[in-house]
Amino acid sequence: MELATQRLLTNSVAAAVVLLLCLQGFGFCFPDHDAVPRYSFLRHAAEAPRVSYHDYIIVGGGTAGCPLGATLSERFDVLVLERGGSPYGNPNVSELALLVQNLAYLTPTSPAQRFVSTDGVINARARCLGGGTCINAGFYSRASLQEVEEMGLNPELVESSFHWVEKEVAFRPRLTGWTSAFMAGLLESGVTPDNGFTYDHLPGTKIGGTTFDQNGHRHTAADLLKYADPDRITVLLRATAQRILFRNRGRKHTPEAYGVVYKDEAGNVHEAYLKDSSSGEIILSAGALGSPQLLMLSGIGPAPHLESLGIEVVLDQPLVGYGMSDNPLNAIIVPSPQPLEITSVQVVGIRPDYYVESATGINLAAALLAGNSAVPAATSPISYSFQGGTILEKLARPLSQGFLRLRNRDPEENPLVTFNYFMEAEDVQTCVAALRTIERVIDSRALSRFRYPNQSVQSLVALSASVAVNLRARNANDSTSLEQYCKDLVMTIWHYHGGCQVGKVVDHDYKVLGVDALRIIDGSTFTFSPGTNPQATVMMLGRYMGVQMLKGPKFH
């Protein structure tokens, strides 16, 4: 046990040093470059005209923006502005084996952009065509029927939209020995029934889908652009929206969105406008950080906050930036005497209040430690991998919520965000219950062959406490009290949402309340994280809303 622990700790520190070296230019990471465009309509913003006119302008070519743009292009002239680069030709994005490197590689234009919440939890947001589907763990699982009903969506159109997405990006995973044992351990621990392989969200244990194919190659929301009409869509890379333009027409006092100012990678300013003859709209699909941030930068948000930064107020909307929530992740690591290949999430145990998942061979600590100057030096860089498994739990619907505020007026910089993890005592109790389930899985007969024989669950909790990474204050009892373990060692599962919630900032058609010709279609509108992992539902929503908007003026 001591040897395994020492090896694990050494790997974590050394892997972090590799990341630091690559950030300093020592060449251990893949370069940040854009490949030859995969689509004829994909180009850099620097090649775009200084002024252009379109039926629809989508800010954010991400998880929702790509399917939305592809769908709208069936009938309309669509411009998609993506602040990041292309996922194509970048092995860090496309290969499962490089999942950690993708999160760890940090430059001003890298696909993953680091941010740290004011709670001290290290996090990331996407900066790449395809959005979060380019940097996540790939698990594909639909929203439940109850969640679809809560979202006020048409079940038949939801079903067809899911199928549209799944034809291109979802696959059945090839289970490894560990994953099969983990699944058996969940069932042995009472997380029943066995639902087999399904994309559906069902109580019990199931094999879910994945966006990694049988060759370990990632498929992203950008792949859904294959459905776009190339003559009706333009997708610009390195196009960073600065602000939305508003006007008041005639006697109408409601602000109307009519254009977007954006910059290319050289800093040149471009303007994109809606066609006067069109009943089109500007649509924000910039994510749970980007959409509320851009609303505020454009003058829609809490007036006192905007005025403190010298931003002209278009609409005093105090609820922009509120309801921010990040589903907490807590994990226990299990070093294994057997070599384990790198696998992402393949199986999930679904309880009403929490979900339990697993991955192997992935040194998550290495990714989180990248760029942390507090990491001690190591003499020789080694692998990012870890010989063992990580079993993690996610709270399904945390009651604790926070808020987002602008740091400054620079759209390239991350806003300030507070999630208030475990502010509500009920969240702590749910986390403890989830960790108890993980302990039972670790102690199951099914998983025993993947553990060192002298490892106790308590020793694994203590080991995990010694390597889990965040910037929060630590208490002496966080390895012996599960309540304290939850609070002190919380990490993110990257499923943060809110800030432009339905019923508060947008209506049920995702139109921004109080202004015309502006919608928000992305995870910032969510009041909960749908399914065990939200990417399936976000891609579905992009397709769903595109189909609705194709119906014409009645829907508008």
Image: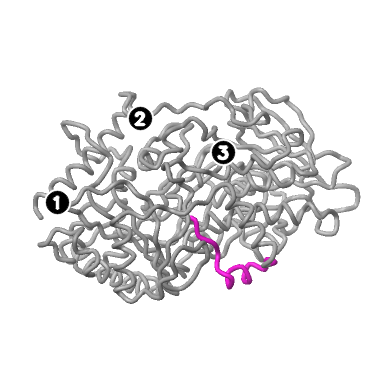
Q: Residue at x 43, y 32 (%)?
A: 107
Q: Is residue 424 visible?
A: no
Relative depth, front residue between 285 and 243: 285
Q: Residue at x 58, y 69 (%)?
A: 147
- Of the residues under marks 2 and 3, which one precedes in the sequence? 2
Q: What residue is shown with label 2? A: 29
- Of the residues under marks 3 and 1, which one precedes in the sequence? 1
Quarter of the picture containing the C terminus is: bottom right
Count neighbours of disc 2 (C-alpha within 10 A) and say few if under 14, some if 14 to 19, many if 20 or more.
some
Q: Position of residue 266 (x, y in %)?
A: 58, 23
Q: What residue is shown with label 1? A: 5
Count neighbours of disc 1 (C-alpha within 10 A) and say few if under 14, some if 14 to 19, many if 20 or more.
some
- Of the residues under marks 2 and 1, which one precedes in the sequence? 1
Q: Which residues are magenta?
A: 140-154
Q: Give yes or no for residue 368 being in the magenta stretch.
A: no
Q: Which amino acid does the dot numbered 3 rest on?
A: Leu
Q: Is residue 429 above or below residue 208?
A: below
Count neighbours of disc 3 (C-alpha within 10 A) and say few if under 14, some if 14 to 19, many if 20 or more.
many
Q: Mark 3 touching mark 1, by CB under 8 A?
A: no
Q: Give yes or no for residue 145 being in the magenta stretch.
A: yes
Helix or strand or loop: what does disc 2 sit on? loop
Q: Position of residue 110 (x, y in %)?
A: 46, 34
Q: Is residue 184 visible?
A: yes
Mark 2 and mark 1: Cα distance apart in space: 27 Å
Q: Residue at x 35, y 71 (%)?
A: 428
Mark 3 and mark 1: Cα distance apart in space: 39 Å
Q: Position of residue 71 (x, y in %)?
A: 71, 47
In the drawing, does residue 517 fall left or right of residue 160?
right
The image's mark for residue 129 is 3
Q: Which amino acid does the dot numbered 2 rest on?
A: Cys
